[in-house]
Amino acid sequence: MNIVLCLKQVPDTASRIVVAPGGKDIQRQELSYVVNPYDEYAWEEALRLKAAVGGKVTLLSVGPPKVQDALRTGLAVGADEAIHICDPKLEGADMLATARILAAALKKIPFDVVLCGWKAVDDDQAAVGPMLATLLSIPCATYVTTAEAVSGTALRVSREVDRAEQTLEIATPCVLTQQKGPHEPRYASLAGIMASKKKTITTWTAHDLGVDPAAAAGAANSVQVVRLTPPSERQPGRILQGEPAQVVQELVKLLKTEAKVL
């Protein structure tokens, strides 16, 4: 089974996020980056599928040169190959542009299953996976927690829906977007880390994919950022004292006049 894992590198949520001058992006120079946590659950499921039925896992990512750090991590964990789509002309691509770029790359890669995290923790869009499936005209299952092969052309997947678990069969080729599931992502071993340093990461540009940069990013984006605003500081808590009836009256008053939730 040929499994492709779409990987995204995101700012570490422990980093201090500062809005850049102009208000349309964040200051990225001092940020530390990590693999998107939901993509880690996706690579765990990808490696389990590979162990069960054989095949290979190929990592695929779009982004600047530092994305190779994330790809090296995936190779160290157990992926077989990595492809990095790196082109300054593609910087600033929104979710639809990113899906188009990935779709163009997947037309050059044999695959049975495409896995990705159900969302990225930096933008919370949860859009690239379904968009990718639509562009490739293949089925998609979202919020997947586990997946297993039931034949050479189908998978049985479990997915979280409305406080319940749904089990379904999906034909391959397909796209699965991975939710946090019962299988914790594995860590890279020392041997895996050393082996990953010897593996070659294939690099493609927009030209290699036959993608027109002018139509894939920047001003051509379907979504334009108008303004980024940091969240307001949380006000300190307040303790109400007095007789219960008096406290209840004061609480109701505050909920109406200050919190404005009543």
Image: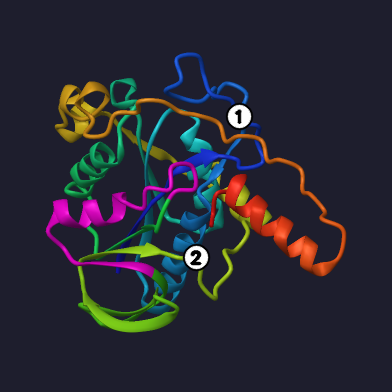
Asked if residue 38 lies left or right of residue 85, the reply is: right
Residue 158 is situated, as x and y percent measured from the top left of the image, at 38, 79
Q: Where is the N terminus found, in terms of image quarters?
A: bottom left
Q: Position of residue 190 (x, y in %)?
A: 68, 54
Residue, x 53% and y 38% (percent of image)? Answer: 69
**Residue type for callout 2:** Glu
Q: Which residues are magenta?
A: 120-143
Q: Residue at x 42, y 28 (%)?
A: 64
Query: Which label sits on residue 203?
Result: none
Q: Is residue 157 visible?
A: yes
Please name the amino acid that badge 1 sits on: Leu
From the viewer's perspective, tell me whether residue 187 is left or right of residue 72.
Answer: right
Q: CA distance from mark 2 to mark 1?
A: 26 Å
Q: Is residue 166 above or below residue 46?
A: below
| Residue 44: numbered disc | 2
Q: Nearer the viewer, residue 146 or 67?
A: 146
Task: Name the foreground residue: 243 vs 212.
Answer: 243
Question: Which percent across, then down, holds residue 197?
Answer: 55, 42
* Residue 259 seen by the camera: no
Q: Nearer the viewer, residue 195 or 168?
A: 168
Disc 1 crowd rating (10 Å Cα; few below 14, some 14-19, many 20+) is: some
Mark 2: which secondary structure? helix
Is residue 135 within the magenta segment? yes
From the viewer's perspective, is 174 left or right of 166?
A: left
**Within-10-Å neighbours for mark 2: few <14, some 14–19, many 20+:** many
Task: Compare marks 2 and 1 and give the one earlier in the sequence.
Answer: 1
Establish if 146 lies above or below 222.
below
- For this orientation, the residue located farthest to the top is 21
Quadrant of res 29: top right
What residue sits 54% from the left and 76% below the top? 182
Q: Which residue is mark 1?
A: 31
